[in-house]
Image (cartoon, helix red, strand yellow):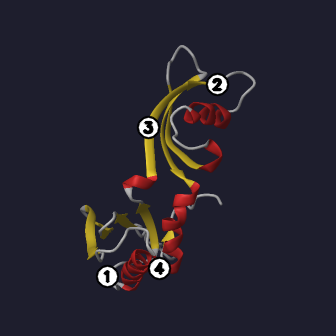
Amino acid sequence: MAILKETYPIGIDIDDRHVYAAQFRQTRQGPALRDLFYRRMNEQQVDSPEWERDLVSALKAVSKNRRFRGKRASVNLPARYVNSFPISFGVAAEETMDTAIARECRKHLSFSLEHAVIDYSSLVEGSPDDKRKFKANIVAAHRDQMHVADLFDRGDVRRQGRPPR
């Protein structure tokens, strides 16, 4: 019988001037650091074609680094692309959970909901007395700003949790 070994994804953090990557491995004592990667980006305008070429080059270097295992990556996009906020909401009898979350998110976003990519990884009941009230932590980004995530395909890195197009 073959024993499949779990491989941790490569964690990649991007900001305007730096790209960081790290990956863990499982040991008998628990998770341990497999390897680290760092590259300073050149001093050009952020989101320019030159910046995007540098980012793709850095991602290819991570992908080809033999000390990392696999090409799966969990990506932390630049903070200016991401909105994060907590919400509390109730679900009316005639609406779904997604509709209630969208209704509440509309109050917090600086752009229209139709242009948002939204994730809510934590969702808990808000009150033990009322099973229709919830709390959630929302992470949202403008759909047009997701082009940075698309650069991962050009950098030969597979992102986990691809947003819908």
Spatial CA span between label 4 and label 1: 17 Å
Q: Amino acid at mark 3?
A: Phe
Q: Quadrant of residue 44?
A: bottom left
Mark 1 or mark 2, whichever is nearer to me: 2
Spatial CA span between label 2 and label 3: 19 Å
* Mark 1 crowd level (few <14, some 14–19, many ≥20, 10 Å Cα): few
Q: Amino acid at mark 2?
A: Val
Spatial CA span between label 1 and label 3: 36 Å
Q: Quadrant of residue 104?
A: top right
Q: Earlier in the sequence, mark 4 or mark 3?
A: 3
Give above or below for 30 relative to 43. Answer: above
Q: Which mark is residue 67?
A: 1
Give above or below for 9 relative to 92. Answer: below
Spatial CA span between label 1 and label 2: 48 Å
Question: Badge 2 is on which residue?
Answer: 91
Mark 2 or mark 4, whichever is nearer to me: 4
Helix, strand or loop at label 1? It is loop
Q: Are marks 2 and 3 in contact (CB under 8 Å)?
A: no
Q: Earlier in the sequence, mark 1 or mark 3?
A: 1
Q: Earlier in the sequence, mark 2 or mark 3?
A: 3
User: Is residue 146 or residue 101 the one in the foreground?
Assistant: 146
Residue 57, position as x, y percentages in the image: 40, 82
